[in-house]
Amino acid sequence: MNSTTNNPTHDAHDHLRHATAAHVDRIHEDIDRVLVPSAAIASRVRALGAMIGEDYAHADGRLTVVPVMTGSLLFAADLVRALPQRRMRIQLTTVSSYGGKSTTSGGSSVVGALPKHLEGHHVLIVDDILDSGGTIRLLRAEFEACGAASVRACVLLRKRIPSAMATPCEYVGFEIGDEFVVGYGLDFDDLYRNLPYVGSLRKEAQVR
Ligand code: IMP
Ligand code: MG
């Protein structure tokens, strides 16, 4: 018997490790197909960070990144860490555009107060996916009305559909087909956001 076997702290850690592995495996079971693997996301985020960093090199102290909650939580967290900016701000916003199911409903509205002190700032909207385009169009108009020096948008994914392709968006991570995806922040009924990749959900899992 080795010395760690009787140590309750080690036992707890082991238990947690196994519980976590089981939980992760069960999440993977609901996924049909991986569309964007985590390594591809990581390298694209680094490239976007470098590109955006250069484009905003003139904006030191006047860049405000606005992640759209909750879908862009993971993407924005990784993207800001890939930016070389010495001084930048982060202000969250929440837009309700769909009921958390697999359909989009068109009308978007800002939930709660808009980010403050955007006047004269270069605003970069960060969202998970460009679908109907309602979210990006709405926020761009709101921030321009706030007197922002410039407003640009960055999305991890853009669906290859007319509404999304027709919505101006300066930075796009990946283009995907017209299908419902989850993972890396994207949800179905608030679930699956913690998957490290983007994938499609099995039909059987799309029930509430
Ligand atoms: P838009 O305003 O229609 O462009 O939709 C953007 C929002 O709809 C995103 O921020 C997501 O929250 C949600 N959304 C659209 N398509 C998907 C999807 O395939 N999976 C998960 N969420 C989606
Ligand atoms: Mg969203």
Image: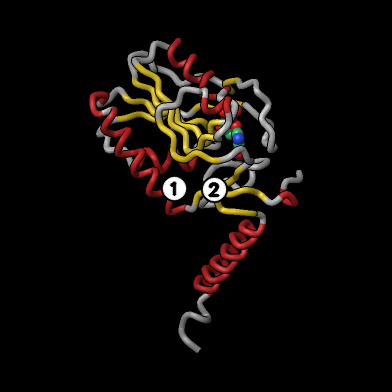
Residue 28 vs residue 163, the one in the foreground: 163
Against 33, residue 12 (above or below) is: below
**Residue 170 at x, y percent in the picture:** 40, 27
Q: Residue at x 61, y 58 (%)?
A: 28
Camera-nearest residue between 39 and 190: 39
Q: Which mark is residue 112?
A: none
In the rendering, at what x and y percent does residue 155 appear?
47, 34
Instruction: Give the quadrant of the C terminus.
Output: top right
Q: Give residue 55's quadrant in the image.
A: top left
Q: Position of residue 121 (x, y in %)?
A: 34, 19
Farthest bottom residue in view: 1
- How crowded pointer 2 is (Cα within 10 Å; few <14, some 14-19, many 20+) is rated as many
Residue marked by disc 2: 198
Of the residues under marks 1 and 2, which one precedes in the sequence?
Answer: 1
Callouts 1 and 2 close, C-beta under 8 Å = yes
Disc 1 marks a residue whose amino acid type is Ile
Q: Give left or right: position of 126 versus 35.
A: left
Residue drawn at (65%, 23%) of the image: 106
177 lies above or below 6: above
Circle 1 residue: 41
Q: Under 8 Å from ligand 1: the CB of mark 2?
A: no
Disc 1 from disc 2: Cα separation: 9 Å
**Nearest the camera: 85 or 33?**
33
